[in-house]
Image: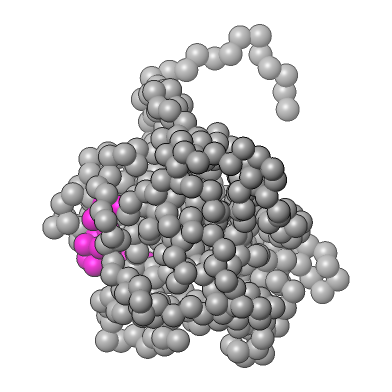
Amino acid sequence: DRPLARRQPGLGPRWWLGYRTAKSAFNRDPYARRAFHMGPHPFETLKRTDAPTTFIDEPRVPRVPKRTDMFARAQFGDLGPAVQEGAKGGHYARKAAPSMAERRMLGAFVLLQDGAPGRGPRPVDAPGNALAVKATSYFLGIDAVGISRCPDWTWYSHDATGTPIDPPHPNAISMIVDQGFETMEGASGDDWISVAQSMRAYLRFSLLGGVIAQQIRNLGYSAKAHTVLDGDVLQPPLLLLSGLGEVSRIGEVILNPFLGPRLKSGVVTTDMPLDHDKPIDFGLQAFCGACNKCARECPSGAITAGPKLMFNGYETWKSDSQKCATYRITTQGGAMCGRCMKTCPWNLEGLFAEKPFRWAAMTLPVLAPHLAKLDDRLGRGGLNPVKKWWWDLEIDDKGAYRPTPHPVNARDLQTDLDLRYEDQTLAVY
């Protein structure tokens, strides 16, 4: 790098006004006029409800073992030998260089996720505890935090070893981490940076969620961080209950009004008294009902273009999880896939970064199909090669990382594809 100049150049009006970016001189510091416990995003402006916007038939939600996880099923051979080979030893994560480094650190943090409670003061002020947890989480760098009850049906029935799980904690602290708009803008969503974006966000929660869990244990309460490598809870329903998003057409992905689907989550469960947040309603059910861009752009054809269904007690747009997992594990043109997140109109700092458009999407459901079409016309979700900063490297049979010999996934939008539900074949398990 070159030495710093004696005098730095002045920042012109484009910087102050945030030309072609969601950031300006007026919002670069989200905490300039906000307390830390409120977070960087204005969740206080959202409509709160007593129940999520999609129905959960709680008495009929079955508890399932971790063995039902698609990546576990892949390793056991349920999805066939080719998928099993791609899943062996987490090859789908190891095949790209950055995610390999992140994956190793994730494994190390598993040792710090749980532990015995200390002899701390055991504060009993539930509202104060909740504010302290949120303020600390935001100070550490978590992008959004919500707190909810942790009902028995959100826990797996058996852990990875087959041991029955007796739910130990009544409260859940759900956290989400942004995967990063700038990098995703330069990607197709299923190329060689996709898995590294995921692993980066998972690693960030493993560290920061582990810090929160340890501090709660220091205060005298029991707490465990549930991560992508070692977790005993199903995170999507907890995100709904804690007010961090709504069910989206993508299916198992909970969409946040400020980050869209471009997020990874983690949960800390605890017996520390905490005030709970309420679910939110920002009009997403009407929007996703009028938009099928993610289904149209899905390279595996796993996302439904049809209506919501009831599945295992949940009202949801049910995706074909096996198609999704198979493509993510076996694609040769990249490592894993997040194309649905890449192309979603709610992948913010795009069209809906502008307040008028976000307001219209949230409050005028009749405009949803027009806003979705406008997103296409503006080319949102397409490739932006200027933002590509990484090399397309793949692990070889000797463990070295070399330029991939396969054509790289570099998909642009399929705006001419008329995807119809009656033409789809989707399996539900």
Classify 426 as above or below 219: below
Whether residue 200 is visible here, answered yes or no, is no
How many numbered discs?
Answer: 0
In the rendered structure, the answer to whether residue 397 lies left or right of residue 43 reads right
- 283 is within the stretch colored magenta: yes
For image coordinates 48% across by 78% down, the residue present is: 63
The answer to which image quadrant residue 156 occupies is bottom right
Residue sitting at the far right: 398
Quadrant of the frame with the N terminus = top right
- 290 is within the stretch colored magenta: yes
Residue 315: percent from left, percent from top: 31, 73
For image coordinates 65% across by 65% down, the residue present is: 230
- Depth check: 273 or 305 in front? 273
- Depth check: 122 or 254 in front? 122
Q: Main secondary structure of the magenta part?
A: helix
Q: Which residues are drawn in magenta?
A: 280-294
For image coordinates 75% across by 57% down, the residue present is: 111
Residue sitting at the far top: 6
Image colouring: one colour
In the rendered structure, the answer to whether residue 317 lies left or right of residue 80 reads left
In the rendered structure, the answer to whether residue 189 lies left or right of residue 113 reads left
- Depth check: 87 or 158 in front? 158
- Depth check: 373 or 102 in front? 102
For image coordinates 44% across by 65% down, the residue present is: 151
Residue 6: percent from left, percent from top: 66, 9
Whether residue 269 is visible here, answered yes or no, is yes
Quadrant of the frame with the C terminus = bottom left
Residue 72: percent from left, percent from top: 62, 79
Residue 100: percent from left, percent from top: 73, 60
